[in-house]
Amino acid sequence: NAGVTQTPKFQVLKTGQSMTLQCAQDMNHEYMSWYRQDPGMGLRLIHYSVGAGITDQGEVPNGYNVSRSTTEDFPLRLLSAAPSQTSVYFCASSLRRVNYGYTFGSGTRLTVV
Amino acid sequence: SQQGEEDPQALSIQEGENATMNCSYKTSINNLQWYRQNSGRGLVHLILIRSNEREKHSGRLRVTLDTSKKSSSLLITASRAADTASYFCATGMDSSYKLIFGSGTRLLVRP
């Protein structure tokens, strides 16, 4: 099925550990982004990419790295996990057009203990 | 800071009634979009309205946009229990592809 695939769905990390959240889309979307969702705060943009080899920071980039080596994949790396990074993470993609909606993945629920 | 703020934060209605949610934003926009999120799931795109449009319909959904007041409303007519979800507005600004989301309205439709 076409769409955005996120793995894993659930993850528990210890403080200081690193990990990579995977995001892949098969719709040939140029634009991809990562959001985190915390209770009562909506979605906040972490990083985004307008195409392979191009990434930029969003509202809350600290503690996260991204790369975009292919159109399909946009992994999010947590360098040294902290309890403040406990959240639900969503990947979204879109065609690189101004008036176009996003397709979201089903999310990764991350707990840092 | 959030670009869009939804009002009310929570809404409880009876099945068959209409549900109205409002969104206010701060800066000029290219478009405003509404998304639905069922509990524990990803967001689903519902409707997009461009800055030069005032009203748009899609099935039981009606969206209005007032750029002079920097506000939008989402009306769901003849609500169903399956409409129970959180609804988010998101704004697209200038020439960017970025969307900035509000904090959402939780809608409960009682059978």
Image (cartoon, coloured by chain):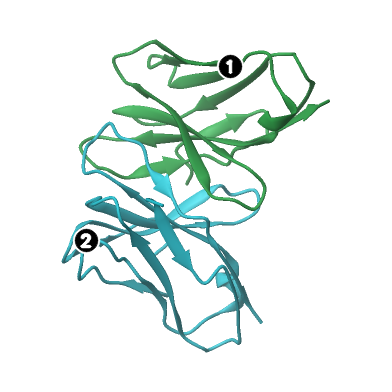
Which one is in front in this view, the residue at disc 1 or the one at disc 2? 2
Q: Is residue B60 left or right of residue A73?
A: right
- Residue B56 x %, y %: 42, 13
**Residue at horizontal 57 percent and vertical 42 percent from the top:** B103
Q: Is residue B66 left or right of residue A70?
A: right
The one of B73 and B108 positioned closer to us in this rendering: B108
Q: Residue B104 sits in which quadrant? A: top right
Relative to A40, say whether A14 is above or below. Answer: below
**Residue at horizontal 24 percent and vertical 42 percent from the top:** B96
Q: How many callouts does the rendering have?
A: 2
Q: Which chain is green?
A: B
Residue under label 2? A71
Q: Does the image show residue A76? A: yes
Q: Residue B33 sits in which quadrant? A: top left
Q: Residue A45 sits in which quadrant? A: bottom left
Residue under label 1? B75
The amino acid at mark 2 is Thr
Quadrant in the picture for the C terminus of chain B: top right
Q: Is residue A83 left or right of residue B66?
A: right
Q: Is label 1 in a helix, a strand or a loop?
A: strand
**Residue at horizontal 63 percent and vertical 43 percent from the top:** B38
The amino acid at mark 1 is Leu
Q: Is residue B31 left or right of residue B3?
A: left
- Report which colour depicts chain A: cyan
